[in-house]
Amino acid sequence: MTSSAPTDTFRRIALRRHPVGEPTPEDFVVLSEPRPTPGPGELLVRTLHVGISPAARIRMSSRESYAAPLELGETIYAPTVGVVAESRDPAVPAGTIVTSPGGWSELSVARSDAVDVFDPRLGPASSALGIYGTSGFTAWAGLRQFGSIKPGSTLVVSAAAGAVGSLVAQIGRLRGCRVVGIAGGQEKCRLVEEEYGATACVDHRSSSMATDLATACPAGIDLYFDNVGGKVRDAVWSALTPGGTVVVCGLISEYNQDSPEPGPPWFRLLSQRLTVKGFLVRDHHGLRAEFLAEMSAWVDAGLITYREEFHDGIESAPRAFIEMLRGHNRGKTIVRLADDPR
Ligand code: NDP
């Protein structure tokens, strides 16, 4: 993989038709278009890496959510890290590495005040999407803002081998929690225990998930960081301690469905005086500098580890996305368009 200067055309991947259930490669189309020209206050950004995120699936359907649905022909939504190829704002000159919602695209135009400058001393550009990007920030900010965690309390996190969940598990451990992960399959569970330091990990594909969870959490669950919803969340409800908290971060088990799952068990919310908080990382941008300082200190000290899984070329984005939704990934899924510029 080499880095190349922008040419007269670029490729982007757009929605060809709305997926029904699990997305298929035929739901997407690769389009080749003339290179755009940035206007005043704008940047032309050449994508280095595309972050593959489950949230893209939410935008492919028209059911109620926090994100506007994509029109057919629109570029698939995704956070990206790239190099400014042309700048119409002297404050962000050509050559700067920035993160922006550039989508599944080789080039994008962004307003200069809508990008974040990435400090390459933190790590390779890909780390701007995972550990130092939306995934890391979601884990860190979700726990900081809503997880009133006390040392010794039991924290359960689902999708615990994934980009957000693996970091929630490790931050929870560093904050003194007893961490129990939930992941798909024995091999992922071993990863969560051995690499991410969870006390235990429960396989959500096992028919004994609910009893395995109760065994792994003998004193109940004080905080549940929910990345998946569905039957995993239902199993957690019955093990929450009085005063327990659920941070609703994601509902990936429902993203391929046309209508939402039935609501929560209201009587249990009442009897256990539970707190359920919806959380969107984009509301917490003001904490970014604090997040980067704390996370990079943990990484530099070897206290936090992370995985990145690369797929090469923009045309690999649909396959990378479909495989991630199926749980084939370990850590952050990234589509690589060019080598790291450092
Ligand atoms: P991951 O890297 O965790 O990949 C997704 C994982 O979800 C898969 O590997 C799979 O793991 C798991 N999964 C898929 N289907 C199911 C299912 N039916 N039941 C249980 N687990 C399932 O993705 P991310 O870390 O990027 O995202 C995790 C969650 O965080 C998503 O729900 C996402 O939408 C949410 N999110 C929310 C943000 C916010 O601001 N609120 C910001 C960023 C992400 P396994 O094999 O273990 O099942």
Image (tube, helix red, strand yellow):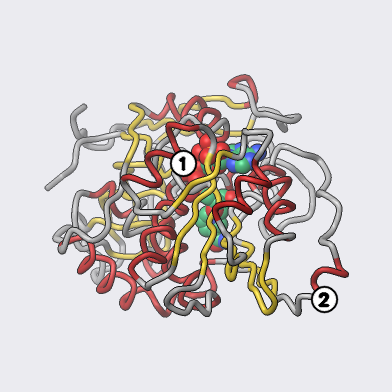
Q: Nearer the viewer, residue 2 or 126?
A: 126
Counting every numbered tag in the picture gives 2
Q: Nearer the viewer, residue 56 or 273?
A: 273
**Residue, x 25% and y 71% (percent of image)?**
91
**Residue, x 67% and y 79% (percent of image)?**
243
Say which amino acid is labelled 1: Ile
Side (left or right) of 260 relative to 43: right
Q: Nearer the viewer, mark 2 or mark 1?
A: 2
Residue annotated with mark 2: 271
Side (left or right) of 263 relative to 244: right
On whether ligand 1 comes within 8 Å of the CB at mark 2, the answer is no
In the rendered image, is residue 74 in sight?
no
Q: Position of residue 298 (x, y in %)?
A: 23, 66
In the rendered image, is residue 256 in sight?
yes
Q: Nearer the viewer, residue 143 or 62?
A: 143
Residue annotated with mark 1: 52
Q: Position of residue 260 (x, y in %)?
A: 81, 49
Say which amino acid is labelled 2: Ser
